Image (tube, grey):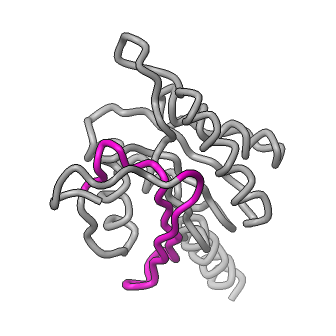
Amino acid sequence: MKALLLALTLLTAAGAAQALPDLVLLVRHAEKSNEPGRDPGLSEAGERRAEALAEAMAHSGVRHVLVSAARRTQATAAPLARRLGLQAQVVGFEGGVAGHVAELTRQLRGLQGTVLVVGHSNTLPELLHALGGPRWPMLCESSYGQAWVLRPGTPGQVLQLRYGAPDPEREGPDCL
């Protein structure tokens, strides 16, 4: 009997450790600067948007922040993380978009509460779908003010929001 109880306890604990968070908030990094190189920081508009994100999500219950290795994702998350006393977890980009999304999904498992993920125009639609959300088009290059609230594992329960300054009009019909 003790062995059975121990086995059930271990199975329950293992299942809980693999559970997804209650809510995942997804945002694209804020506007990037025009500085040369492959890893630009934020422009002045991007810094303002990062502050707007911190203001908008200050009382959202965020307990964890995941970002890519890109400076612009880290700088976007920094004001909120600082305000909440959190340290952003950096998720590498090994394996391209698919590898990054798989690693984000792996790291989300076992996190509890509300998690903010700051990503990229090509990773966020894939992550949204990997977590049980619908397929979304890629984000336009000029699209920075969108956010999604997702309850993982519940198809169709996605809320799309906008924050900060309005984005310019879309560049084409195949992106948001």
Residue name at image x 69 percent, y 68 percent: 113
> Quick one: 28 or 67, which is closer to the camera?
28
Q: Quadrant of residue 55?
A: bottom right
Residue name at image x 44 percent, y 50 percent: 104
Quarter of the rendering occupied by the N terminus: bottom right
In the image, 136: left or right of 34? left
Does the magenta portion include 98? no
Q: Position of residue 49 (x, y in %)?
A: 60, 44
Magenta part of the chain: 138-165
> Quick one: 108 or 117, which is closer to the camera?
117
Q: Position of residue 59 (x, y in %)?
A: 79, 64
The relative height of residue 5 versus residue 43 in the rendered view (above or below) is below
Residue name at image x 46 percent, y 30 percent: 32
In the image, 94: left or right of 147? left
Does the magenta portion include 159? yes
Q: Position of residue 88 (x, y in %)?
A: 65, 39
The relative height of residue 60 versus residue 63 in the rendered view (above or below) is below
Q: Quadrant of residue 36?
A: top left
Residue name at image x 43 percent, y 33 percent: 92
Q: Quadrant of residue 138?
A: bottom left
Extreme left residue here? Answer: 173
